[in-house]
Image (tube, rainbow, N blue to C red):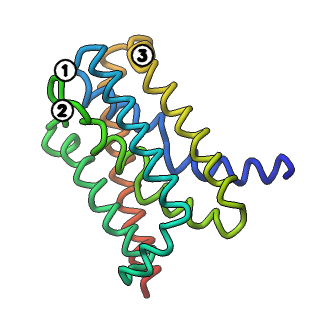
Amino acid sequence: MNFSDILSLFLPVFVAMDAFGVLPSFVQMTSTLSPKDRQVVLRYSVLTAGVVGILFIPLGPLVLSVLGLKTGDFQIAGGLLILVVALRDIVWDQKMSLGKGVKGAGVVPLGIPLLVGPAVLTTLILLRDRFTMPEVGLSLILNLLIAWAVFGYSARLIKWIGEPGARVSSKLAALLLSAYAVMMIRVGFFSLK
């Protein structure tokens, strides 16, 4: 495998996962938690995303086929779900909070669909056409480790950009997330025709 192949395997998952784009949502949703509880949420979100992604690599096409779903159906549903999350912050200025001390709160929406959602799952299916399942799995794991590091240092990153910067980046991320959701819906819709 040459460097070009490695980039072709790594970058699509990196872009689809977008850990830096999800960072403001992570900070926002865990802002009421203690540092210890924030670490629990981080572990649950990355672990959930990893398990779902790894299982989806071999089983995803089979599951979609058995349910009679196309990749476009999956993109539309995921896009709608992500759009709702983004609109809560943009339109109603309601920040999603995970609450205090809630075990496993990182499963939804952080683990799924924000870290490993329809974009990542669809990307994993498409990468299977070109690479082996272990290679695709390794790409997913490397990207999850990057997400773990980004979220693990979230307090320092947010401290560095400041509270106003965090608010601006949160709104911008929500706007970009809503645009991304609309793109997923559009691509899914046109792929069904």
The residue lying furthest to the right in this view is: 2
Distance of mark 2 from mark 1, alpha carbons? Answer: 7 Å
Q: Position of residue 79 (x, y in %)?
A: 34, 61
The disc labelled 1 sits on which kind of residue?
Thr
Question: Which residue is disc 3 drawn over?
Answer: 161
Instruction: Indicate the position of residue 105 as horizontal and vertical percent values.
Output: 24, 36
Pointer 1 or 3: first along the chain: 1
Question: Which residue is pictured at 45% across the width and 71% down the height?
Answer: 187
Residue 38 placement: quadrant: top left
Q: Which residue is at a point 85% across and 52% down the rendered structure image?
A: 1
> Which numbered dot is residue 32?
1
Tell me if residue 38 comes above or below residue 95 in the rendering. above
Judged from the image, the secondary structure of the residue bearing numbered disc 2 is: loop
- Which residue in the structure is indicated by mark 2? 97
Choose mark 1 or mark 3, whichever is in front: 1
What is the CA distance from the residue labelled 3 to the residue labelled 2?
21 Å
Q: Are marks 2 and 1 in contact (CB under 8 Å)?
A: yes
Q: Quadrant of residue 158?
A: top left
